[in-house]
Image: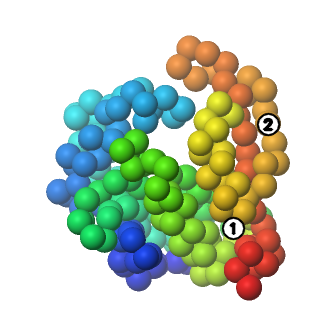
Amino acid sequence: MLRPAYPITTHRLILRPFAEDDLDAVFMIQSRPDVAKYLYWEPRTLAEVVAGHPERMALTTLEEEGDGLVLAVELAATGELIGYVNLMWLSAEHGGGEIGFIFHPDHHGKGYAAEATTPLLRLAFEELGLHRVVGRLDADNRASARLLERLGMRHEAHFRQNEFVKGRWADEAVYAMLAHEWRELNS
């Protein structure tokens, strides 16, 4: 079980559970076509963002497999919500997890996603004791692939036309890191 002490802070960022008053910022992210381009969903309406917000706010602990953390990422200097990161506990038996991230395009290319995702890898390996963490993405999403590589994850698989998404067959790329690789990177 993992109940992180919130907020989680980095040099420039604050990671925290979502709050009721985050709706406008989440809508500003999720309603953008350029954000939804490589995701399973189309740009979301305000009603869709509102409907998903209670679940987003509740995903704050990992008590058993299937649970997830979804954390708002805000700039420490301004308090602006710029994106969110997630950690899912996929399997207790196999010690598996998955990370993900979504950021407003105005904040791409500044290292924020790597800075926000690194604490999730630390939680996964050092606190929850996972053996393996993956990142799955549309193989056309080269920016996210480069981020996973910068985090130290290795490209493990490329599944051709693996899923039918938004009217087209999409390739899926899988990146992964093992606990001993995390320790080696951080020793």
Which residue is found at the position 60% from the left and 75% from the top? 122
Which residue is found at the position 20% from the left and 57% from the top? 20
- Identity of the amino acid at label 1? Ala
Residue 4 image point, x, y percent: 45, 79
Determine the residue located farthest toward the top in the rendered image.
167
Q: Specify the label residue 158 is tagged with.
A: 2
Pointer 1: what residue? 92
Q: In the rendered structure, which disc, 1 or 2, sits on the residue that comes first in sequence?
A: 1
Of 154 and 129, nearer the camera is 154
**What is the crowding at mark 1: few (fewer than 14 residues within 10 Å), some, or many (at least 20)?**
some
**What is the crowding at mark 2: few (fewer than 14 residues within 10 Å), some, or many (at least 20)?**
some
- Identity of the amino acid at label 2? His
Which residue is found at the position 64% from the left and 38% from the top? 142
Q: In which quarter of the image is the C terminus?
A: bottom right
Of 69 and 39, nearer the camera is 39
Whether residue 58 is visible: no
